[in-house]
Each structure stands twice: as C-alpha cells, then as structure tokens.
Amino acid sequence: MSVEVGPLGVDVLKVLILGLLGAAAALAAHAGAAVYQDGLRTSVPELWRGGRDRRALAAFSYTISIGFIVAYALPYSLATGIVIIHIILLAIDTIGLRFRRREVAVVVGFLYAAFATIVIDLFVSLVRSTRGYASGIDQLFAPLAY
C-alpha cells in the first residue's frame, strides 16, 4: 500500500512495520532487556545498579552509535532506498534508555522509526524522479569486490 505525494511515494505498510519495530525496540531498551548496539550491552546493567543514570547511559549510547549511523548506514540508505536497520535500532537504543516513562519511550521510538523511514523513502523517490538519474547502483558496491 503506497501513498503518492506528487512524483514521490511512501509505502505506508513499510512505515507502519518499521514504526512498530521501533516501538518494540524502545520498549526492550527501556526495560534493559535488549539493546542493538553491541558496545552498549555490557553497560546497561549499570542503570539498574546505579552506576549510571538514564541520561548518562543515553549519552554514551549516542556517542558510540552516531558515527556508524552517519558514516555507514545513512549513505547506503540514501543511495539504495533500503532502510539500513542500524539507522533505526541504534537510535532507538538511545531513545529507549533516555526516557524515564516507558510509554513516552515507546511512542517516541515509533515516531522516530516512522519518520526516518518516510524521510529516506521521500529522498530516494525525489532523487529517482529527477531528470538524468541513472541507476548505477551496482557501482556503489564495486569497492567491496576488492
């Protein structure tokens, strides 16, 4: 199910599914049950032992994740139109850990995941609708062959 915005398109089902994934991941991170970032897993118990508060742990999560999102996941997502899950789940770790109230973390997690999906889809649709756009997507992954 797609909604067309002029020449641009957004897949509503995809946005809903990734939004629900974001909400579930925020709930798991908030509860300390699971986080996506490997480097964060060993630090989450500090929240319950009192070694770090939510703000400090969320800041740590942001610090170890933002570079990976900006340098790796975002460029590939914008170039291919495929939402690299790191964009959603690494940021959701920060969101889930930051908010004290579980309900707020879940809602913000859903909204962030939906928003990120919409922005990536709209950007890719816009680029593909411009004149002179040539696929060449295979060239994007050529360096990996070496």
Image (tube, grey):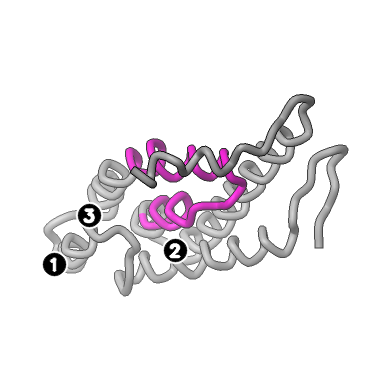
Q: Is residue 119 left or right of residue 1?
A: left
Would you say the residues marked 2 and 3 are in contact, meaning their CB atoms lie under 8 Å apart? no
Q: Which one is earlier in the sequence, the residue at label 2 or at label 3? A: 2
Instruction: Check disc 1 and give the amino acid type.
Output: Arg
Q: CA distance from mark 1 to mark 2?
A: 20 Å
Would you say the residues marked 3 and 1 are in contact, meaning their CB atoms lie under 8 Å apart? no
Q: Is residue 51 above or below residue 139?
A: below
Instruction: Check disc 2 and give the amino acid type.
Output: Ala
The residue drawn where x is 38% and y is 46% is: 145
- As for residue 24 lying within the magenta part, the answer is no
- Quadrant where the N terminus sits is bottom right
Q: Which one is earlier in the sequence, the residue at label 1 or at label 2? A: 2
The stretch of residues the image draws in magenta is: 66-93
**Residue 37 appears at what percent x and percent y?**
30, 58
Q: Which residue is mark 2?
A: 26
Q: Residue furthest front?
A: 146
Q: Is residue 126 left or right of residue 111?
A: right
- Dot 2 alpha-carbon crowd within 10 angstroms: few under 14, some 14 to 19, many 20 or more: many
Q: CA distance from mark 3 to mark 1?
A: 10 Å
Q: Secondary structure at mark 1?
A: helix
Instruction: Check disc 3 and give the amino acid type.
Output: Asp
Q: Which residue is mark 3?
A: 53
Which numbered dot is residue 49? 1
- As for residue 90 lying within the magenta part, the answer is yes
